[in-house]
Amino acid sequence: MSLSIADSGIRLAVLCIVMALVATLVYRFTSLGSVRVVPGALVRGALQLAAISLILAAALAHIWSAILVLVGMFAAASFTAARRCGAGTSGAWLTIALASGIGVVLPLMLLSGVVPLEGIALVPIGGIVLGGAMTATSMAAKRGLDAVDDRYGEVEAALSLGFSQRDARWEVARTAASDALLPGVDQTRTVGLVTLPGAFVGVLLATGSAVQAGAVQILVLAGLLLAQTCSVAVALELVARGFVFRGKTVRPARVR
């Protein structure tokens, strides 16, 4: 049993346009910002989804093309994480943090046999895990760098007590950076009670089986938690050791 909610007909287009117009009116009369924000975002999203739909239709047919899609997604995620944390070119080191997350989760899923080595399974699950790791990595790096900048007096105090540069920066950045894990943990705690995540809804609509949808969703959530934990830990280490730093400040010596 499957259920089709959205088709590509005129009703879908009209409904999306109406919702965008209503949101634009709210922007206009409440002075939330430019009235072009919502229409612009919707048009951009539609074009991107149209492009990726065409690409995936061809890519998912072969495992090698599916891997190429994942590589492209990984490159985009690395660039986005570096840009969001405001670390300039040093943000490229966050690629290691992302790789540590996705590099642990996907092999475990594939070797266990739970996720088949097929494009139709590899790309969606890999994309979800990669997206979660990207968000957590950029947030951890940004908050860690903010903490080091704002509380540098505490770093110097720790140094005066005999801490190494790495340990002093780690202690200051650790609490702030670990906050990047809270959204994923909260999502897992409230799943089914407050929200029905996309993987659950997608499988439910495609198969009509709530049990199968729940199994896929818990697999995705477990993978997200592991990937985000690994990525945040590595991102924090990179900040503490001075590999990732703010571009407008003097580069700290890489420390051990």
Image (tube, rainbow, N blue to C red):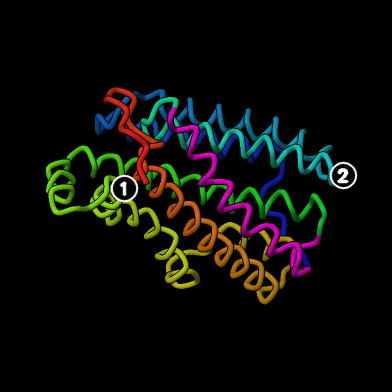
Judged by its main secondary structure, the magenta piece is helix
Task: Name the residue at 27% across, 25% down.
Answer: 249
Horizontal side of residue 166 vs 97, given as left or right: left
Number of residues whose C-alpha sits closer than 10 Å to that of mark 2, classed few (under 14), some (14–19) or many (20 or more): few
Residue found at the very far bottom of the displayed protein: 211
Residue 137: in magenta span: no
Residue 44, quarter of the rendered image: top right
In which quadrant will I find the N terminus? bottom right
Kindly identify which residue carries mark 1. 166
3 in relation to 131, above or below: below
Across and down, in percent, residue 240 comes to 34, 45
Mark 1 neighbour class, 10 Å CA radius: few under 14, some 14 to 19, many 20 or more:
many
Please state which amino acid type lies under the numbered disc 2: Ala
Q: Choose between 168 and 94: the one closer to the eye.
A: 168
Residue topped by disc 2: 61
Residue 98 at x, y = what percent?
A: 54, 46
**Mark positioned earlier in the residue sequence (1 or 2):** 2
Q: Residue 52: which disc?
A: none
User: In front: mark 1 or mark 2?
Assistant: 1
Residue range in magenta is 90-116
Residue at 84% over, 37% down: 58
Of the residues shown, which amino acid type is indicated by label 1?
Answer: Arg
95 left or right, relative to 8: left
103 part of magenta stretch: yes
- Distance in Å between CA atoms under marks 1 and 2: 47 Å
Q: Are marks 1 and 2 in contact (CB under 8 Å)?
A: no
State the SS at label 1: helix
